[in-house]
Amino acid sequence: MIKFGVVMFPGSNCDHDCFYAVQQFFSDQVDFIWHKSTDVHGYDCIVLPGGFSYGDYLRTGAIARFSPVMSEVKKFASAGKPVIGICNGFQILLESGLLPGAMLRNTSLRFICKYVHIKPVNFSTPFSKGLKKNEAIHIPVAHGEGNYYIDDEGLKKLQKNNQIVFQYCNERGIVSDDFNPNGSVANIAGICNEAGNVLGMMPHPERCCDPMLGSSDGKRIFESLLQSLNQRQTV
């Protein structure tokens, strides 16, 4: 049985969304993990949800990186187990050094809350193996600081190591600055670490796992992850 853990920070507001998506559609084995916990033993995947951890004081994710649980998340990730950070969770992964780069304010200087399209461009991660080339995933974003930044040298390294997992695009899968909602470098919507087991993405797959929410495309990202975890358990 696959077991998920959803970390709760003070200010998290998508923790229940993630819990529901995993429990309702994929697994009954899902727990909340309080940010002060120092035990993540027994979990197969850890989710860092969206929200405003610690009120986003200083910078998004800057205080959450010091939560006791993050030391355990780092050990969990270094063991090759999958970690997914969504929106604020992505920001926390950046601040904690689990992923390279940083987040800036949206170029519009406004909070963005709408559906966009993203295109998978790396199919070797547990989160994207089940996706198709040239498809456009219909998915919501909700952030004020989602403008992913990395310098030219860092971007070249991401490209060389195939660490860019998702890019903003249109409904036909065309990647262009015209469809970039926040100004992210290279239209980046999600990246992974070099090992491929840690994913950070600004869009919210947990908010589009049911047609009643406007799209069920996000479900496929979780399905890809579950398929990878099931294969790992049978090896």
Image (spheres, helix red, strand yellow):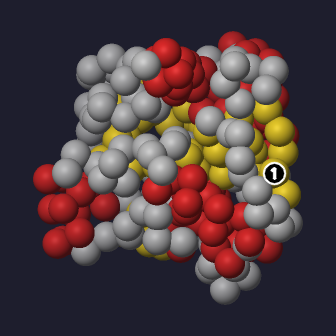
Task: Rate crowding at label 1 as few (under 14), some (14 to 19) or many (20 or more) other CA atoms within 10 Å.
Answer: many
Kindly identify the residue that appears in the image at 39 percent across and 49 percent down: 192
Kindly identify the residue that appears in the image at 61 percent across and 39 percent down: 45
Quarter location, residue 52: bottom right
Residue 39 in the image, given as x and y percentages of width and height: 76, 56
Residue 139 in the image, given as x and y percentages of width and height: 55, 32
Does residue 142 appear anywhere in the picture?
no
Q: Which residue lies under the disc numbered 1?
A: 33
In the shown orientation, is residue 101 left or right of residue 155? right
Kindly identify the residue that appears in the image at 79 percent across and 32 percent down: 30
Q: Nearer the viewer, residue 20 or 77?
A: 77
Looking at this view, name the residue that lies furthest to the front: 235
In the shown orientation, is residue 54 left or right of residue 158? right
Quarter location, residue 208: top right
Q: Nearer the viewer, residue 66 or 41?
A: 41
Does residue 33 appear anywhere in the picture?
yes
Q: Nearer the viewer, residue 233 or 198?
A: 233
Quarter location, residue 148: bottom left
Q: Nearer the viewer, residue 129 or 112?
A: 129
Above or below, comparing residue 143 to residue 16 in the picture? below
Quadrant in the picture for the C terminus = top left
